[in-house]
Amino acid sequence: MRSRITKALVRALYSLTAYSQWTTFHATMLSLLGTGAFMVFSAEEMGAIGPILLSLGICVIFFALMSECILTLRVLLKVLIVRLASNNPDAS
């Protein structure tokens, strides 16, 4: 018999394998973070174009992080609105 923690872990892993637009979004942002990190760490070896590559890498990382933060804020606001609406008996 599985424990509750094992069942919760299996459910979480299964939800990660389900394909949706948000899975694609997270995969894209993760690949952007990796690309930006590679650009930042390899900029030193590029000579004169290094500072440009460094700033572009930082911009890519910033874009990926801000996109994830905006999505998280959207989800949290949705949860908050649903909770407030369910607790308000006057709402129709």
Image (spheres, rainbow, N blue to C red):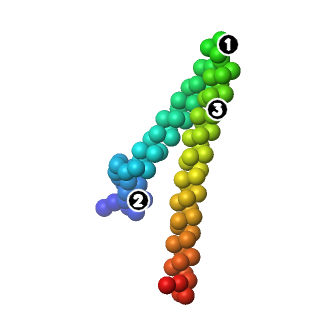
Q: Circle 3 sits in a helix, a strand or a loop, which is it?
A: helix
Q: Is residue 85 above or below residue 89?
A: above
Q: Is residue 2 above or below residue 34?
A: below
Q: Residue furthest top?
A: 47
Quarter of the N terminus within the rendering: bottom left
Q: Residue at the location (56% across, 26% down)? A: 38
Q: Is residue 37 above or below residue 11?
A: above
What amino acid does circle 2 point to?
Ala
Can residue 39 be seen here? The reply is: yes
Q: Between label 2 and label 3, give the one nearer the viewer.
A: 3
- Tell me if mark 2 has few (under 14), some (14-19) or many (20+) residues whose alpha carbon lies within 10 angstroms of its own: few
Can residue 13 be seen here? The reply is: no
Q: Between marks 2 and 3, how big is the CA–CA gap?
A: 36 Å
Q: Residue at the location (55% across, 55% down)? A: 72
Pick the front one: 38 or 67:
67
Name which quarter of the figure residue 55 lies in: top right
* Residue under label 3: 58
Earlier sequence position, callout 2 versus callout 3: 2
Residue 25 spot, x, y in % from top left: 46, 45
Q: Residue at the location (41% across, 59% down)? A: 8
* Residue under label 1: 48
Q: Is 46 left, or right, of 7 in this rendering?
A: right
Q: Circle 2 sits in a helix, a strand or a loop, which is it?
A: helix
